[in-house]
Amino acid sequence: MPCTEATPECPVYRPRSPRASPLYRCVEDHAEELREAGHIHRRVEDETLDRFLDCGDLHKGFARVHCDQCGHEYLLPFSCKTRCFCPSCHQKRMLIYGEWVEEEVLAPVPHRQYVFTVPMVLRPHFPSLGP
C-alpha cells in the first residue's frame, strides 16, 4: 500500500509539473527563434536551454525510489542542475548553499545585516563609490 500521508519515516513525494510553468512554455516556444536569430552566443547558453527543457522529463531519465517502510515505489525524474535559469534546480542549490554557509562558515552567534547609503550629494567625496 503506498504512503498516503507524510511521516518522518515515509515522506510523500509530490512530483512537480515543469511543463505547466510559463517559463517552460516560453522557452519551448521561442528557443529555436533565439538560436536562428543569433541571440545564443555561447555553447553554455544553448546547453542550458536544452537541459532546462529536459528537466523533470521521465523520458530523459529517472531513478526508481523505494520506501523500505511501506514498500511504495515511485519514479523520480532527473533534474537539469542548472543554476540561475531553472527555478526548481536553482532553489535547491541555493538552499543547500545556505545550509552549508550556516553550518560551516558562520560562527554560532546572532548575525545582523545593515545597509548604509550615502546621499547622492555626498558621493563625489567618496571616490570608491564611483559616479
Image: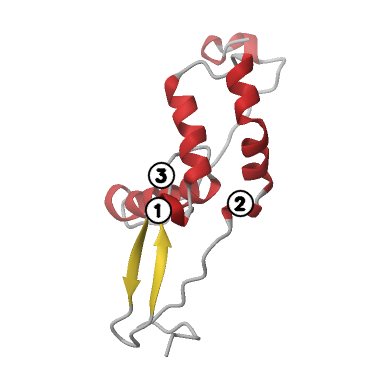
Mark sitting earlier along the chain (3/2): 2
Instruction: Please give the residue where the numbered disc 1 appears in the rendered image.
Output: 78
Residue 116 appears at what percent x and percent y? 59, 32
Task: Measure how far apart labels 3 and 2 are at the Cα level.
Answer: 17 Å
Instruction: Please give the residue where the numbered disc 3 appears in the rendered image.
Output: 81
Q: Secondary structure at mark 2?
A: helix
Structural crowding at the residue carrying mark 2, measured as other residues with C-alpha within 10 Å and reported as few (<14), some (14–19) or many (≥20): some
Name the residue rendered at 51%, 15% in the picture: 41
Residue 38 appears at what percent x and percent y? 59, 14
Q: Which labelled disc corresponds to residue 19? A: 2
Task: Measure how far apart labels 2 and 1 are at the Cα level.
Answer: 14 Å
Q: Is residue 12 above or below residue 89?
A: below
In the picture provided, is 116 more to the left or to the right than 1? right
Mark sitting earlier along the chain (2/1): 2
Residue 24 lies in what quarter of the image? top right
Name the residue rendered at 45%, 57% in the picture: 58
Q: How is the image coloured?
A: secondary structure
Structural crowding at the residue carrying mark 1, measured as other residues with C-alpha within 10 Å and reported as few (<14), some (14–19) or many (≥20): some
